[in-house]
Amino acid sequence: MTVNAVMLAGGKNRAEMRALTGVENRALTMLGTRSMLDYVATALDQSPSVGQVFVVGDVPQSSRYTRITGGATLIENLLAGLNAASSGGSSERILVSTSDIPFLTPESIEDFVRQGLASGADLCCSYVSLTNCLAKYPEMKRTAVKLREGRFTLGNLMLVNPVPLLTHPEIIEAAYAARKSPMQVAKLLGFGLLGRLLLAQTVSPSVLPVATLEQAVSRLLGGIRAVAILSAYSEIGTDVDKPEDVVIARRLLGEA
């Protein structure tokens, strides 16, 4: 089974990134002779399980993908991409990727898609062991959360069933709108979960297993089944969004 893919390429560089890279669109950040957009598009194009690729953002046209005009927010871009990728019912599940993961490989994509399809879930989020990330990319700092099973960083791939999200976009829009308000997040996820999250980071990680977070996200999204897919591929969790990341990525990719 093949899945269509949506790459979100509308993110803007902050001032310090613009000063270093000379571009506003993060996806167009050059790592030597190639942009991050090119690295990710190449990995998607070379993945046997990926069918059509749709890129949402102000980027150059390419024979490897279809460019889609986005909106003013991340959610508007996501919904525009899902609409395009699911047109005609050609893909029961859609792979969603950010455009700032230049280390992405076809192997890492294949592994994630395989696990996601096998789960049968409506929403599959990727996550990666912090130990694996530091072992492969020791210079690149990652934000991690402590859970019962270990310390993990969120990945940059999702596999989604587009039907519930496109049928009820207000669910994901409400979650996105609440992201900067702790009180709103607490109302959506529940104060009990936030308390356990705080305890897990400061006292004992054992109070918060991955399954509890999966259940909370499922409730947040109106009852659709959400699961977390553990990837052994650090490439999925290693995004380039800070000036120091760009410097390291250029060196590691041999494009300095």
Image: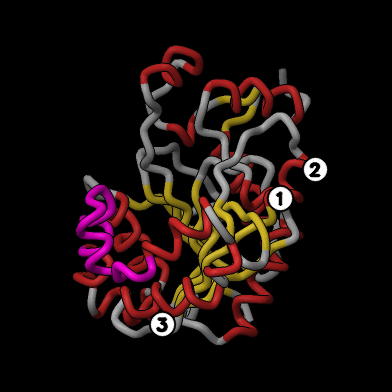
Toward the viewer: 24 or 127?
127
- The answer to which image quadrant residue 39 occupies is top right
Find disc 1 in the rendering and name its residue. Answer: 234
Q: Is residue 11 something one can see in this rendering?
A: yes
Find disc 2 in the rendering and name its residue. Answer: 135
Q: Is residue 218 magenta?
A: no
Could you say whether the residue bearing mark 2 is in a helix, strand or loop?
helix
Up-down relation of residue 243 to residue 90 (above or below): above
Toward the viewer: 256 or 199?
199
Q: Are marks 1 and 3 in contact (CB under 8 Å)?
A: no
How far separated are the C-alphas under marks 1 and 3? 32 Å
Q: How busy is the neighbourhood of tag 2: few (under 14 within 10 Å), some, or many (20 plus)? A: few
Give me the disc on residue 89. 3
Residue for point 44% across, 65% down: 196
Query: Which percent across, then down, holds residue 96?
Result: 49, 61
Q: Is residue 4 something one can see in this rendering?
A: no
Could you say whether the residue bearing mark 3 is in a helix, strand or loop?
helix
Q: Are marks 1 and 2 in contact (CB under 8 Å)?
A: yes
Q: Is residue 194 left or right of residue 119?
A: left
Q: Amino acid at mark 3?
A: Gly
Q: How busy is the neighbourhood of tag 1: few (under 14 within 10 Å), some, or many (20 plus)? A: many
How far separated are the C-alphas under marks 1 and 2? 9 Å
**Magenta-drawn segment:** 174-193
Could you say whether the residue bearing mark 1 is in a helix, strand or loop?
helix
Magenta stretch, main secondary structure, is helix
